[in-house]
Image: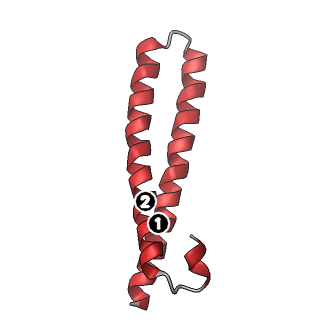
């Protein structure tokens, strides 16, 4: 995101935003897989809840990054 300082590298910024969105979709897949494994193997309800919250917080973080990338892309569209 170094290109945000001068907005001269629009293609580089767009590519970075697309990469962020790709990672967010991968994080969604990872969350589903991790939760599936957690519920299949989890016997301790307390640990299950703790890990579920951790996994969901991590995915939420990637979701917020994707939101920021979307906002940046919106700004770039207005600039074009």
Residue 75, position in %: x, y?
Answer: 46, 82
**Residue at image location 37% in from the left, 39% down from the top:** 29
Secondary structure beneath dot 2 equals helix
Is the image coloured rainbow, by chain, by secondary structure, or in one colour? secondary structure
**Quadrant of image for the C terminus:** bottom left
Determine which residue is flagged by label 1: 16
Determine which residue is flagged by label 2: 19
Crowdedness near tag 2: few (<14), some (14–19) or many (≥20) residues, C-alpha within 10 Å: some
The answer to the question of whether label 2 and label 1 lie on touching residues, with beta carbons closer than 8 A, is yes
Is 45 or 3 nearer to us in this picture? 3
Residue 35 horizontal side relative to residue 58, left or right: left
Residue 6 horizontal side relative to residue 24, left or right: right
**Residue at image location 62% in from the left, 81% down from the top:** 5
Q: CA distance from mark 2 to mark 1?
A: 5 Å
Secondary structure beneath dot 1 equals helix
Residue 77, position in %: x, y?
Answer: 38, 83
From this view, report whether residue 9 is shown above or below residue 52: below
Crowdedness near tag 1: few (<14), some (14–19) or many (≥20) residues, C-alpha within 10 Å: some
Q: On the image, which quarter does residue 73 sit in?
A: bottom left
**Residue at image location 39% in from the left, 33% down from the top:** 32
Residue 78, position in %: x, y?
Answer: 41, 88
**Residue at image location 51% in from the left, 51% down from the top:** 62
């Amino acid at each position: 995101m170094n290109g945000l300082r001068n907005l001269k590298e629009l293609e580089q910024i767009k590519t970075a935003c697309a990469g962020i969105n790709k990672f967010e979709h991968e994080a969604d897949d990872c969350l589903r897989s991790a939760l599936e494994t957690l519920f299949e193997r989890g016997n301790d309800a307390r640990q299950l809840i703790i890990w579920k919250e951790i996994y969901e917080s991590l995915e939420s973080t990637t979701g917020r990054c994707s939101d920021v990338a979307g906002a940046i892309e919106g700004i770039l569209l207005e600039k074009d």
